[in-house]
Image (cartoon, rainbow, N blue to C red):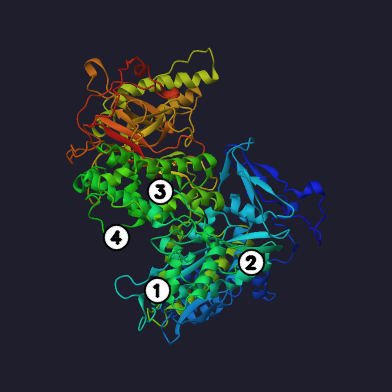
Amino acid sequence: MDIDPPVDEPAERPALSPTDRRTRVEEVIDEGDKQATIIDKYPVVAGAGMIKRTDASPHQHAYDALRDGNTNVYSPFANRVEWEIAQWVKNEGISDAAFDRFCDLPSMRNENGLRVENARQLNQKIDQLPGYGAWQQRTISIQAEGSTQLQSHEVFYRDPMDCLRALWADPAFQAELMVSPEMRWFSKSRTIRMYLDMNTGDWWNAKQVRAAHYTILTDSKFLQGNLPFGATVVPIIISTDKTELSMFSGEAAAYPIYMTIGNIPSYIRRQPSRRAQILIGYLPVSAIDKTELTDLAARNARAQLFHEAVRAILEPLRIAAASGVELTDSKGNVRDAFPLLAAYVADYPEQCLVACTRYGSRCPKCDIGRDAFAAGIAGSPRIVEETLARIHDAAAANDSLSAIDEYLRTFGINYIPHPFWEGWPHADIHLSITPDILHQLYQGVIKHLTAWATTIVGEAELDARFKRVLPAYGLRYFKDGISGLQRVSGLEHKAIAKVLLGCLAGAPQKDAVRAARALLDFTYLAQYTCHSTDTLAMMDESLADFHKYKAVFLNTGAAESLDLPKLHSLVHYVPSIRLFGTTDGYNTEQTERLHIDYAKQAYGASNHRENDIFPFMCTWLERREKMFKFATHLADENNTTYVALKRKPSGRPRLPVDFAKAPNGRSRTVRQIVAEHGAVSFAEHLVPFIKTYVRTEWAKKHKNTPVPAYTIPALDTIGFDTWNKVTFNTPDVQTLHAPDTVDVAFASPAHKTKAKTLPARFDPVMVEINGDGVAGEGGMEGIRAGQLRVLFEIPEHVQISIFDRLHIPRPGKLAYLEWFSKLGAPDEVTGMYAVKRSMRSGNRASERQACIVEAIDLRRSCHFIVKLGARDTGIPLHLNINRRIVQFIDSTIVTVVGRVLQSSQNEQSSQSTGGSAAKSEPAAPAASRAPDAREQPEQPEQTGLLPSSGFLQMSPSPS
């Protein structure tokens, strides 16, 4: 991320000439991107992120105070040994009693570096370390309507400003800290805008730009901000979610509230090990005493308790948002910061609780009602001032809670006398409600779509189709179907979504398939980690397509109503992405993951006594955090980065097409390869491959010069090393920091393990037939599908005698595969491609067309799935992909815009029956084109999608 370098600023605001009073942007070309992305940044003269002065680093100052002049960098620990033992004890969750026993070992009493004698002394040293702020306990009292007594509840929290200062001064985030807004464009023409982190969205731009002096044109309208000159926006992201702590018995629960800031890139915030999201409190989970209370009064008391507790925790941030606060980073740079409430991450019930709207009948972002949820349109945006005014008017005009509730019912509002966001400067709680991929998409509309599909196809039939989706890398195999699943999780709904469209294909209600495809397209598009105006338009188009065909679910009786709050919420996704950047920056899935570290593990280490749980959890977490901060400090002292992972990242570089160091089969003869892998034409294709490869490589260096004579040994005298699998590491085409997409394809003969005998598995793969493509780019152009049979390498002595002797590059790993027919036009209903096995002609018509290619031309695995009729499974379960498959269909979930694709393939195999086969032979890759491959005539391909066809489907893999 390009950040303006610090500059010496005058003590007073500089005078600006009339021409300087318009926001000036600095054009920066992002060198990290493969294409020349244009970044319009705000120079320091515009005031965004301006450094006020430079002080001593608060991070360094805190640890220097611990040393008290001594040279021990590990102080308060006696030495490095004691520090590393302490780190191991806390990271591994060793109990105090176990550590006491460890200290009592005779060997520990000798001179070994450990100076503490028990866990108590160790904890005393840890308690001296700087942390994120001290934990506090506070009592919140609520008097419910109709009750004469105050009900007291305990809230545990720490000052969020202390947590904010600790985040801002963390040296691990210094290089990535974003202090000013920017706009990214796909090219210099500035016609296609790009959205990534929060600072690329309209919200930050609107808040930053001062109305009196600066304006910026975006999306054909002027956005104006109202912060003082030199202000640094700190977008506060709050998330809450209640979670169960006890596993099999008991009712222990926790209600964590987390905080992070939008100045830290989302790719860091998504990593729990980086600790960029901080637990700032535990909301009360004690029950409301409902004695003498009506249901309405009890519900209202619970809601008031929530808002009072959140207000008590966030009050310091609310105060700082009004006048600003000085924040010092790890380099000592001081800025005037304004912590503004930007996003509130929660599921739908909690969104309604936070926004004071009616659950199930109203939207927390707009005024649309339940009767219009299915319309696919957004209502008028809710306005904070109007919400508060109606709450206050209702209280002033009515004497009882029931009358107030009835008054507010018309507006879809719940009565909360003082919501926590009341009076928070620059805050708009309705705008801050963000999309929720986990609960709204996977646990919401995908869950409903699966139920509708079950009704349309039939429960038994849909189960049968899921059973025939064989196990594959990255896919879950539902061996018993999906109808018997209980309490289906988000991960299970993700697994179902990957193959649902293929299992629906062939259903007589084509509109149902079209609607399902549109909804699945929207789901995957919504998860892009980089968006453009084009991909946002594609999201709108997909949602419009769903609403175009959705009536089929009502007409068939699959759905009683489509007035679903989560379905309506989809209309707010694109506006939210424009405001706050991509959805990976505010996904409740991250909150669910944080529960493991900040609630469940802490509870597991406690004694489970009700009165002691939260005090113990707070202390336990505080000590672990202090150890983490100290480890980060020591790494920064050594100019390294601390990686808080139990399994350290491998130092071995990942190749685009990667193999294990050692082969699975050594010195396999041609006869053995034919028998074990079914590679009947292996010997027939290897010699032409070598000749073509030598001729091609020789011509690159010696034009118009014949190839010198060389000898290819008799193949029956050669032993080949073989590998059972190949790993594809495809670079992400959207963002620089995203990890590679990892995919695996197998070419494994039947073999025995210690536990069982594994059947043969020969996966379909995508092949770059021109030999000049780049992994991850280009979509389906120049791609052909083939079935991987053998992964092998030419023996060393042969490589020396041919390639080294001729001084040409060695070909590396090779792959023998059998072709499928070329990809034609995708099916209009499913978007899938029809493919069949390519067979030879003449008296060899029963043989597959095959080829040997360089492994570097393999792109990734493919996904085969059967296309069936409406209610005819048609395939015995005992068949598999390696036998008797003749026809398939290729289903590719890939965007046509192509700039920011995030489509990756998982292998999946399936079976099919009967049908005629097209006899076509593809061109081999340029460097490995064999003469016999060109000599075989191509037969006309069969068009149309037959009921007996199968599917070759590329499905997006998990994030």
Residue 48 lies in quadrant:
bottom right
- Name the residue carrying label 3: 375
Q: Can residue 205 be spotted in the picture? A: yes
Q: Which residue is mark 1?
A: 299
Q: Residue at x 38, y 33 (%)?
A: 766
Estimate the x, y position of residue 698 in percent, counting from the top left. 50, 19
State which tag comes first along the sequence, 2 or 3.
Answer: 2
> Counting residues from the N terminus, which is met first, the one under dot 1 or under dot 3?
1
Q: Nearer the viewer, mark 4 or mark 2?
A: 2
Taking the image as shown, residue 675 lies to the left or right of residue 862, namely left
Q: Amino acid at mark 4?
A: Arg
Disc nearest the viewer among 2 and 1: 1
Give the Cα distance between marks 1 and 3: 30 Å
Disc ID at residue 321: 2
Residues at circles 2 and 1 in contact by the CB criterion of under 8 Å:
no
Amino acid carrying mark 2 in the image: Ala
Q: CA distance from mark 4 to mark 3?
A: 29 Å
Residue 509 vertical position relative to residue 674 in the rendered view, above or below: below
Q: What residue type is disc 1 on? A: Arg
Q: Secondary structure at mark 2?
A: helix
Number of numbered tags placed on the structure image: 4
Label 4 secondary element: loop
Q: What is the C-alpha distance between the residues marked 2 and 3?
A: 38 Å
Kind of residue at disc 3 = Ala
The residue lying toward the viewer, choosing from 112 and 304, is: 304
Q: Which residue is mark 4?
A: 487
